[in-house]
Each structure stands twice: as C-alpha cells, then as structure tokens.
Image (cartoon, rainbow, N blue to C red):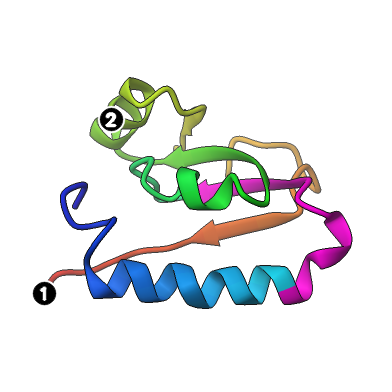
Amino acid sequence: MNRFEHEYWWHVGRRFILTRLIRKYAACFKNDLSIIDVGCDGGNFEFLENFGRVFGADNSTFAIEYCRKKGRPVKLVTGNALPFPDASSDLVTFLMFWNI
C-alpha cells in the first residue's frame, strides 16, 4: 500500500476530493484542525497535516509500528472505541482501500 499511496489514481483522486471538502466545510478552523485518521498506515498524515494536527489510530500492530517508524503519533485501537477523549477532535477520517 505504501508504494501506491502517492501515485495510484484512487489515492490521488481521494486526496483531491477530500482537500476540496475540508476547505469548504472546515475553512473556519484556518488550518488548525485536530484530526484523527482511523485505519492509518501513516500515508494520509502528509496530506492531512495541511489542515492541522493529525493523530492516527489503528487496530493493527503492524500498521502502528509502520506509522511510528515514519515518526507519526498513533494509538492502538482495541474494541469499538477510539482511544481519544470525546469531542477531542474536529475531524475524524476513515480512509480505507480494499483490494479485492
């Protein structure tokens, strides 16, 4: 996944669409959003950091280690609850890609 996330049409197009949506609906925050990226491998941090502070959450220890190697703040998710206090973020993303 890491090899494709900067060039593959799915990721490039998704970032283009999300950039426009975030700019439209979160413009009042002026690039100071608190963002949680759920199901992350660290690849969306670079794009999301244009809008504020990004924190990752994933249930895979492999993904957690990968994010940490990239120097990304990330927490392990266990169960159905995110490991962040209620109302502690302005935006939560869950940007999955399934290769079936």
Q: What type is the residue that disc 1 sits on?
A: Ile
Residue 80 in view here: no
> Looking at the image, which is closer to me, 13 or 34?
13
For discs 1 and 2, the disc positioned in front in the rendered view: 2
Q: Mark number for residue 66?
A: 2
Give percent across and percent down for residue 42. Answer: 38, 40
**Which quarter of the figure is the C terminus placed in?**
bottom left
Give percent across and percent down for residue 55. Answer: 57, 37
| Label 1, residues with CA under 10 Å away: few <14, some 14-19, many ≥20 | few
Give percent across and percent down for residue 65. Answer: 30, 25
Q: Quadrant of residue 11?
A: bottom left
Does the stretch in magenta take in 70?
A: no
Q: What type is the residue that disc 2 sits on?
A: Tyr
Residue identified by numbered label 1 = 100
- The CA span between labels 1 and 2 is 23 Å
In the image, the segment drawn in magenta is 24-37
- Residue at x 62%, y 76% (from the top left corner): 20
Q: Is residue 63 left or right of residue 28?
A: left
